[in-house]
Each structure stands twice: as structure tokens, then as C-alpha cells.
Image: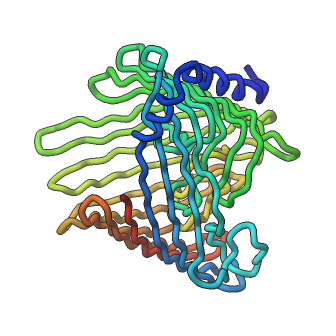
Amino acid sequence: MKKLPSKLMLAAAIAAISTPSAYAAESIAEAFQNGETSVSFRLRYEDVEDDSAAEDANALTLKSRLTFKTDEFKSVSALVEVDDVTELDDVEYNDGVNGMETKTKIVDPEGTEVNQAYLAFTGLPDTTVTVGRQRILLDNQRFVGGVGFRQNEQTYDSLSFKNNSLADTEVFYAYINDVHGITGADSKHETHLFNVKYKGLPFGALTGYYYNFEEDKVDGYDLETYGVRFSGSQDAGDTKLLYTAEYATQDNGTTDPDYYLLEGGVEFSGVTTKLGYEVLGADGGVAFNTPLATKHKFQGWADQFLATPADGIEDLYVSVGTKFAGVKLLAVYHDYESEDTSVDLGAEWGFVAAKKFGKNYGLSLKYADYEAGDTGTDKSKLWLTATAQF
């Protein structure tokens, strides 16, 4: 199962298409006529001060998204989604592809692209088969996600299967042929994802997974990752207890670094407090790697540790969240240390305030301030975001 030819995806697509093609074109046309169209916009101002760059930077970008999904016909439906990212002022920041190396990075390059384009087949019992460019978000996105915070989402050219035949169980498999990253660049893959989640326990959900991340290029990566995750909550009177535990190990061909997470929390009187400890370990100078993760969600919003330090990283964090006058508020503090050598890697404060206006509009303010420890440099980021969807 290590290598599957790319033709597998093409064969699955032909099989899915062949099912409805034998029927009258009028019925297929009706599936399109009954389809649903949606549009959304995200206007964002981002300001970054980074002591590691010669110049600071800011950006004012607009993300426009058009999505069309057909009605289902003979168990087959289709979805096409197009995104456009436009800088509303001069591009005076390093967007990851424009070569402005003296500027601070704001990885929101301009461009228009197909974000998703797939066929979905539901003709098998309790099963959905999806082929084409699609969104894949597994668990909390620590290993596989869409990096949805950035203006250009990460999506996958993939053949995926989701099955719910077993009681309280979801089985997911995907073969990824191509990854479309947040810079707009593509990377060829031979990646396999297995994820099985059981929700029948009275106190939480248990997930087991195997991910073989393999980037098919010179100096790419081949990472076999095995793990187990448990997450749940329990009511205790007026209080809700929250808990998560996760462990994974990764074979990179030479060493076997580990990952683990322990998180506990309490919801009481409208306030949620969490304390967590996350470790991406190192073995022989090679750290645990999460190449397809939504990394912005983890280890601080300043994105200081998108690449795991060679000596690994320990992240001790605490968060407090609530809602006041319809505004969601969240504050997070992180303390970082290298896993293998106990070097002080600094600390970070983060804060976000967000409010919805009806079903269609939203505003948010987000801020992160990273203070370097024995290594690195200080960095702060500010985001003002307005959204609309119809």
C-alpha cells in the first residue's frame, strides 16, 4: 500500500462519472438547475512587526469565494469552488513567492484559483466517495488541515472514502496525489491517510490513525505517523470538565521522534479555562514534523514555530474564553522550551475578539505578541477582519 499509482484517482473518477452518464441529459441538467450557489468575502488588514526582518510590513487583502454545488443525481453530486485573493494596496510584503526577502512575511499572495472541484458518490451504504480537489480536515487539524485562517486555503487532489457502517464509528481513508498550499504552489504526493474514530464511549471519542506523508520530490519527506487520540467532556453539576490526551510516533527513516498532548479544561458560569502541554519531540537532532497541519492553530498565532526546531519543542499553555455582549473573547498564553536541550524558546500572548452580525456578517480583532527567549527574535501580529457570506 506504500505506493499507489496516480491512475487510481482517474479510474475512480471514471467509475463515478459512468454511473450517471447512462441516464438522460435532461436529468443531469436538472441537477445543475437545482444546484446551490454561495458567495463569501473576507477583508483583512494584517500588520506584522518582526525583528528578524529588515522591514516590517502590512497588507490589506480581499478574499472572494464563489461556490457551486449541484443537486444529487443517481447518488452523484459535484462541487466547484473558485477563490480570488486581491491586495487592495501596493504589495509591499513578502508573500512567500514574490521574492521580497527584506520584508516581513505575510503569506497571502494574490491570485485566482480553483480551491475545490470534486465529484461525490453516495451510492454505497453509509459511504461517501469523493474524487478531485477537496478539503480534508482531520480531528483538530494538528496533522491534516486546510490552514483556513490564511486567505488562500490548503486543499488536496485526492481520492477519499468515508464510511459509517459500524455503530458510532467513522472510518476515513484518503490517497493524496497533490497538495495545493497557501502560497498557491503545488507539491506532488504519494500520501495515505487512515483515520478511525469511535464515538460510542459515554465519556469521549477515541481515534486511531496512520498517516504516511510522502512528498514526491528531491529533498521531500517520507514520514510514517501512528497515533491515538482521546477527547471528551463530562457534566458535573453547573460545571463541564473537558479533557484531551494524544500520543503519536513518527518514523522518518532514520529516527523515531514522538508527539504527545495533555489538555484539561473547565466550563463554569460562561467562562472556559484550559491548561495544556504539547510536545513535538526530537530524536537524534530530527524533530517530529507535521507538514500538512493547520499550524497557525498551534504553538501561538505569531507563527514563530511553523517549522519544528531541531531539538523539538515543549509548549505549556493556558487559555481563558468567554462571551460578553455577543462578543466572543479569548486570551491565550504560551511558554516554549526545547524538548531535547531545555533551551528557553520564549513566550507569547494572544488575544481575539469576534462578533457575528446576524447570519451573514462578522468582525474580528486578533493580536499575538511573541517575546524571544535564549534564541529567536521578537514578533507581533495584528489582524482586523470583516466577513460576509450569502
Left or right: 87, with 272 as reference point: right
Determine whether 255 is above or below 44 in the image.
Answer: above
Q: Which one is in front, 18 or 332?
A: 18
Left or right: 288, with 28 as reference point: right
Q: Which one is in front, 235 or 260?
A: 235
Determine whether 210 is above or below 328 in the image.
Answer: above
Q: Is residue 276 visible?
A: yes
Q: Residue at x 71, y 67 (%)?
A: 96
Q: Which image quarter holds the C terminus?
A: bottom left
Where residue 143 sits, quadrant-wise, is top right
Q: Residue at x 42, y 20 (%)?
A: 164
Q: Which image quarter holds the N terminus?
A: top right
Q: Residue at x 62, y 41 (%)?
A: 133
Determine whether 21 is above or below 349 in the image.
Answer: above
Where residue 242 sits: x, y (%)?
30, 42
Q: Residue at x 66, y 80 (%)?
A: 91
